[in-house]
Each structure stands twice: as structure tokens, then as C-alpha cells.
Amino acid sequence: MSKNPVSHHPKLYEYIKSVSLRETKEQKLLRQLTQNLKASAMQISPDQGQFMAMLVKLIGAKQIIEIGTFTGYSALSMALALPDDGRLIACDVSREWADMGKPFWQQAGVNEIIDLQIGPAVETLDQLINQGLESHFDMVFIDADKTNYVHYYEYALRLIRPNGLIVVDNVFWNGAVVDEKDNSDDTTSIRNLNQVISNDLRVDISMIAVGDGLFLVRKR
């Protein structure tokens, strides 16, 4: 589970969830199932899922790309916010993990909305561009292997429409981005992307303390 931004005050975080969180039965069950995995830290927090669903509704999104699906909680959260004619392309390299979410997508009535693509995300993104879908999508959520973050960002900019939204997860990397002693590949990649976005005049930006840090990027 992503660290929450008020971890120094756990009672406050529990309060936030108690008065704000509106999880469906399917979301809660999938989240609880995922918590039993060794890789459970890869799952977004429920309040982050609800926040992203709010973004989907606020921008009137119909076409979404998710880069990094894991067990499907984030895909479920966003798909529930889409209209009936919406589409979410979910990219992941692990069918085993992604298949865990399918029964819950089905129970929630969004299985037909989610188009699961198993394989390297860059290949799926290339295919979308080759299909003439540049500037077609409303929103892209990036939450996959960190060393490719800059590449995913550039793909996202090509694929979203003007005024479309890119949401980048884990931009705090559990605080490692400000740890001068941490120069691991993942940390360096996230630092690099954060700086790239900061200097990118093609977009409007806001980094916010939701989950493990989100960078919200609006294409001009």
C-alpha cells in the first residue's frame, strides 16, 4: 500500500478515510486480497483511487490509458467513473497479477470497459500510435517500472489530447527523491522525470501529496 501523506498522524488518516472514502464492495474485496501479496506495496491506497476517479469525472474522460495495472484496483477505480461508452486500456507485463482483478471487474460491471493488454507497455503504446490514436486519449495514469518513466511520459504526451491529463504515481518514492545518498536506478529515474516535468513548458503542472506523491500534468 502506498504510504499516506499524513503517516505522522495515523489517526488523521483514519479520520480522512472514515468521512471521505466511498469504496464499493468490489474495490474493498480486491484491495484486501491484494494486501496478502508480498508485492502489496505496489497497490495504490483507497483514497488515491477515489481521488483519481474524481479526476476522471471532473475532466469528463472517456478514453484512458493505464501504464501498470498490478491486480487491477486502480483500473477498477477509474473504470467505475467512466461512462458506459468509455474505455480503459490497462497495460501490464504480468497476466497472473492482472487476472486477479478480472472477477472484481466483472462483478462491478466494468469488465467490458477495461481492455487488458499483457506485454511491454512501450509495445502497446507504439501500437496505439501506429493506429493513428495520437491526441486521442483524455487521461494517462503512469505507475509501472520506474526506469522507463520518462519514456512513458513522452508517449503519454503524444497520446493525450490538448487539455488531457497525465497522472504520474510514486513521485516521492517513499521520500527517496530527497535522500542524497540514494542514487539507485529507480530513484534516479523518478528524480529525472520530476525535473523533466518541472521544466516542460508544454504542460501545466501540480505535484500533490496524495499516496506516495502524484504529479498532475495537463497538456496545453
Image (spheres, rainbow, N blue to C red):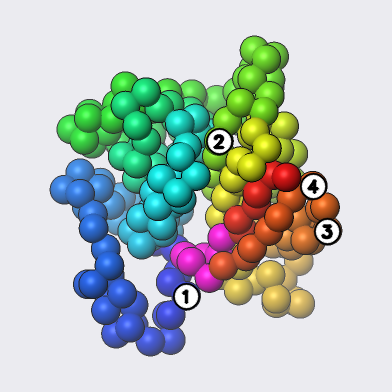
Q: Looking at the image, which is closer to me, 165 or 15?
A: 165
Disc 2 crowd, CA 10 A, few/some/many (<14, 14-19, 20+): many
Horizontal and vertical percent for residue 6? Answer: 43, 80
Answer with left or right where residue 33 lies relative to residue 63: left
Q: Are marks 3 and 2 in contact (CB under 8 Å)?
A: no
As shown in the figure, which amino acid type bears the numbered disc 2? Asp
x 23%, y 58%: residue: 22
Q: Of marks 1 and 2, which one's residue comes earlier in the chain?
A: 1
Q: Secondary structure at mark 4?
A: loop
Q: Of marks 1 and 4, which one's residue comes earlier in the chain?
A: 1
What segment carries the magenta color? 209-214
x 45%, y 31%: residue: 62
As shown in the figure, which amino acid type bears the numbered disc 3? Asn
Q: Of marks 4 and 2, which one's residue comes earlier in the chain?
A: 2
Q: Is residue 159 above or below residue 132?
A: below
Q: Is residue 186 above or below residue 68?
A: below
Q: How many marks?
A: 4
Disc 3 crowd, CA 10 A, few/some/many (<14, 14-19, 20+): few
List the residue tagged with mark 4.
202
Q: Residue 138's mark?
A: 2
Answer with left or right where residue 198 lies relative to residue 98: right
Horizontal and vertical percent for residue 144? Answer: 57, 44
